[in-house]
Amino acid sequence: MADHDRAGLDGLITPPLSRRGFVMTSLMSGLTLATTRVEAQVIHTDSAGIEAGEVKIPAADGPMPAYRAVPEGAGPFPIVLVIEEIFGVHDYIKDICRRLAKAGYCAVAPELYARQGDLSTMSDPKQIIRDVIAKTPDAQWIGDLDATVAWAASAAKGDPNRLGVMGWCRGGRDAWLYAAHRRDLKAAVAWYGPIGGERTDIQPRTAGDVAAEIHAPLLALYGGADAGIPVAAVEEARDRAKAAGKSVELVIYPEAPHGFHADYRPSYRREAAEDGWARALAFLKSHGVG
């Protein structure tokens, strides 16, 4: 790993970093099995005017499955890294990539848990957290995102000088951490990402721990009715960042629960989701990712 790519990883790498083979060699089809029912309001974005589909990204230990959507044309286009929920790169995450491509972005969602388990077969969120999420080193997925940026710039018409990241749920937590890692990141958007959590040898820091170290402005979109993420914890992270001279814009949707953007789940709240999406796109553009 080059010194530039290692910037901000202090405290995240636990050497030696063990690599393992990929359990998932392709993305899942359809929606995650870990949802009780699929809601009628699922959004489907077509591929007119864009190029979209599964790709393979060269990672440190082999080809990593990912989904890429980019506008037609020569480019280069600003890059947005899309960080999945705990459920994998399923149809909802793929659709988000297409929505971003329609807005002019090279959007790429790598399957960051491909080494730890086959998410396409898992229906129990507790099993996913225990057997996959908890066993994925932060340094691993951070390295994979760096590899995704390099690939997008060389093979997917992406412009690395206009780089943003957007993550949902666990991916929202990861957006905070990646903003504390990547010095050339222009903007980050965290959708209801956990602020606290257990610290382990392979996941040594929380989003709250790195709030004062972020290198890019961050938009934090959270639900006031989120039973798992207290508003006070998010406000504390924002205040810690601001005290360190960092920029965090926090938006709380008072009646929204966790997962309010996930249109395939009962947690979906259309008004909050649409407002958050508009804010996210405006935030990226206002900070040079556009």
Image (cartoon, grey):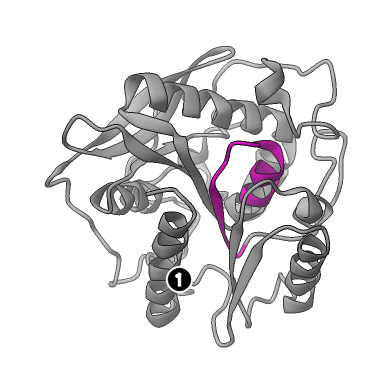
Q: Nearer the viewer, residue 161 or 9?
A: 161
Say which quarter of the image contains residue 246. Answer: bottom right
Q: Is residue 191 magenta?
A: yes
Residue 204 vertical placement versus 259 (above, below):
above
- The x, y position of residue 55, in whole percent, is 34, 26
- The x, y position of residue 250, in whole percent, is 63, 72
Residue 224 vertical placement versus 283 (above, below):
below
Secondary structure at badge 1 equals: helix
Furthest residue toward top: 61
Query: Which residue is drawn at the image coordinates 77% and 18% (left, top)?
Result: 17
Query: Which residue is drawn at the image coordinates 32% and 26% (left, top)?
Result: 156
Q: Nearer the viewer, residue 118 or 257?
A: 257
- The x, y position of residue 32, in whole percent, is 43, 50
Q: Is residue 205 magenta?
A: no
* Residue range corresponding to the magenta coloring: 175-192
The quarter in which the N terminus is drawn is top right
Answer left or right for 214 relative to 197.
left
Residue under label 1, please give it. 276
How packed is label 1: few (under 14 Cα within 10 Å), some, or many (20 or more)?
Answer: many
Query: Which residue is drawn at the image coordinates 28% and 46% (left, top)?
Result: 101
Answer left or right for 228 relative to 88.
right
| Amino acid type of the residue that numbered disc 1 sits on in the rendered structure | Gly
Furthest residue toward bottom: 255
Q: Nearer the viewer, residue 189 or 38?
A: 189
Residue 42 vertical placement versus 167 (above, below):
below
- The x, y position of residue 16, in whole percent, is 83, 15
Query: Which residue is drawn at the image coordinates 63% and 82% (left, top)?
Result: 224
Say which quarter of the image contains residue 221. Answer: bottom right
Q: Nearer the viewer, residue 152 or 282?
A: 282
